[in-house]
């Protein structure tokens, strides 16, 4: 699995299921570095590393969803040789959703399960004004007001902040230029997660994911704000472990549609 796009914190030659993880805007593969120890022994965690962050900091970040999805699909294809699932948080949920639809259309493959967190269903319109082109001070202010996702230590360190801002602008450009297109629902289960204290994404926003699957839909609300995957990581991974465990009993099942 030699690809700069895919980081496996703990490679697992015995894996029968791969969980591809997509981070929120401004996030990278390091977010998922501790996940393997709390998941199934038959599961391999593969974190997606987009250009422009962490070990790919010198590469130009992508700014449009179609370009990102096509590039991701090409990089991931060799790794889709066993059953696989997606987990995506916030922007990562939208990337995972569009990637699943692209894989279905172009390669006749589907994940066995989709786990989407802290993101309203894609068919719902975004009411907030665009911010990716704002001047620096206004852009940072909006990020703090909306998500409270930039650590205070970074905000107080101008050098670190300057490293992060291009990546954040690129990620918000992906989100804010995204255009949803209606297609048939996916034939794989979807589990949506939300934070009870998330003032950006409400229960109904998450429940609307139901229309994107012809299979089972589950909604779980966990303690925490928009970034509840930090405060409620144990509960989140327990749900993923429990849900992903069932397909492992059918490891011979093809992951093709």
Image (spheres, grey):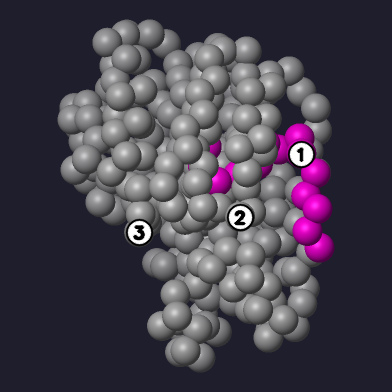
Which residue is found at the position 63% from the left and 65% from the top?
146
Query: Which residue is identified by label 2?
Result: 199
Mark number, residue 30: 3
Nearer to me, 114 or 228: 228
Compared to residue 82, the image places residue 49 above or below, namely below
Q: Secondary structure at mark 1?
A: loop
Give the residues in magenta.
Answer: 116-129
Q: Is residue 1 visible?
A: no
Q: Is residue 146 magenta?
A: no
Compared to residue 44, the image places residue 163 above or below, namely below
Q: CA distance from mark 1 to mark 3?
A: 30 Å
Compared to residue 4, the image places residue 187 above or below, namely above
Q: Position of residue 198 (x, y in %)?
A: 55, 53
Q: Secondary structure at mark 3?
A: helix
Q: Earlier in the sequence, mark 2 or mark 3?
A: 3
Query: Which residue is identified by label 1?
Result: 124
Q: CA distance from mark 1 to mark 2?
A: 16 Å
Nearer to me, 57 or 123: 123
């Amino acid at each position: 699995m030699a690809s700069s796009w895919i980081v496996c914190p703990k490679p697992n030659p015995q894996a029968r299921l791969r969980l591809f993880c997509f981070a929120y805007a401004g996030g990278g593969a390091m977010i998922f570095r501790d996940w393997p120890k709390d998941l199934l022994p038959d599961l391999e965690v593969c974190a997606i590393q987009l250009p422009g962050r962490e070990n790919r900091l010198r590469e130009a970040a992508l700014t449009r969803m179609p370009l990102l999805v096509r590039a991701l699909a090409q990089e991931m294809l060799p790794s889709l040789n066993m059953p696989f699932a997606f987990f995506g948080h916030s922007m990562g949920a939208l990337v995972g959703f569009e990637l699943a639809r692209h894989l279905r259309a172009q390669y006749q493959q589907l994940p066995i399960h989709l786990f989407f967190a802290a993101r309203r269903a894609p068919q719902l319109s975004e009411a907030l004004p665009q911010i990716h082109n704002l001047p620096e001070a206004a852009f940072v202010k909006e990020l703090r007001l909306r998500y409270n996702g930039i650590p205070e230590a970074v905000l107080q360190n101008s050098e670190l902040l300057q490293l992060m801002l291009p990546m954040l602008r690129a990620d918000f450009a992906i989100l804010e230029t995204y255009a949803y297109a209606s297609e048939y629902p996916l034939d794989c289960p979807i589990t949506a997660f939300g934070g009870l204290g998330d003032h950006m994404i409400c229960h109904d926003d998450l429940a609307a994911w139901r229309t994107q699957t012809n299979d089972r839909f589950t909604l779980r609300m966990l303690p925490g704000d928009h970034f509840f995957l930090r405060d409620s990581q144990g509960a989140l991974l327990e749900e993923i472990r429990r849900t992903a465990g069932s397909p492992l009993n059918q490891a011979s099942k093809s992951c093709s549609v």
